[in-house]
Amino acid sequence: MEATVALLLNFAIPAVIVTAIFIALLLFALPREVRTIFKREVKSYFNSPIAYVCVVIFLLISNGITFWFGGLLESGEASLYVSYFQYLPWYFVVVAPAVGMRLWSEEQRLGTMELMLTMPIAPWHAIVGKYLAAGVVIFAMLVLSFPIVWVINYLGNPDNGVIMAGFVATFLTALCFLAVTSVVSAFTRSQIVALLISIGICLLLWLGGLQPVSQAVTSLKGGWLVFWPVLKFINGIGILPHFSELAKGVLGFRDIIFFLTFIAFCLFSTAVVLRVKRA
């Protein structure tokens, strides 16, 4: 009983408030044109098997690895970072592109992109609306993983603020991967091509933040220095360090700015690609 009360006060109620604010912003604060595209895309996702398949696969893999391979019950670690959150971005390297691969590839395949771009809406209305609809699918995945938080509260006395930070960090990371997929899908009409290329880029962005890459950048010598600019760039835009700080409960303004800037740049790049195609 105490665990349930603690969960409600420290995690569930704040999560519901944040969710309500998120939904209110989507339904009322956005321009009417964005809301129209957003509602159409959300219906499209949940009227097809894509959203349900991605959600089920994500929940099975994330919970299965956490309990059976992550050693959640044996570790005694209550923040969920070691046994849960550090693995989530690896899943979203694949899951986020799977959700977003149809953003623009499907429009090109069906020949409806030209029709959409000639409608009395600005291109950014369509870009933001479609992107937010895909983001809702990602959001639903994280919301439905709520039982693991109840389990950890039932077994111990965790810091639910840190757990909430882990979910926020994971959501922002997944949105970055989704933004990358938006750019890639604008280039091709094949969803499979968009999926594979996006997975490769997202994996590179994630691995670019690993410590070995940082060490490789600083230890290059001789002829290998020719690769220094590339490795430095990959390491500089690596998502892992920013995710790790937020997921551990360290709320850094620099990390938030990184995520928001990265997403904005990718959506801007999507607009550039679509404008070139439109021309």
Image (cartoon, helix red, strand yellow):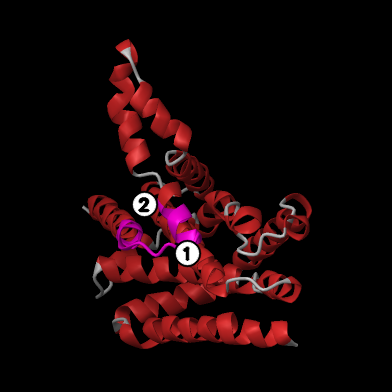
Q: Secondary structure at mark 1?
A: loop
Q: Is residue 75 left or right of residue 117?
A: right
Q: Which residue is mark 1?
A: 249
Numbered range of the magenta stretch: 242-260
Q: Is residue 87 magenta?
A: no
Residue 222: % across, % down:
31, 11
Give me the residue at 28% from left, 51% from top.
273
Please say if 117 is above or below 217.
Answer: below
Instruction: Determine the residue positioned at 23% across, 55% down.
Output: 275
Q: Is residue 196 above or below residue 120?
A: above
Mark 1 surroundings: few (<14), some (14-19) or many (≥20) residues within 10 A:
some
Which residue is denoted by mark 2 in the rendering? 183
Discs 1, 2 touching: Cβ within 8 Å: no
Single out the mark in the foreground, 1 or 2.
1
Q: Reading the chain from its start, which is encountered first: label 1 or label 2?
A: 2
- Residue 75, how many percent across, how many down? 73, 55
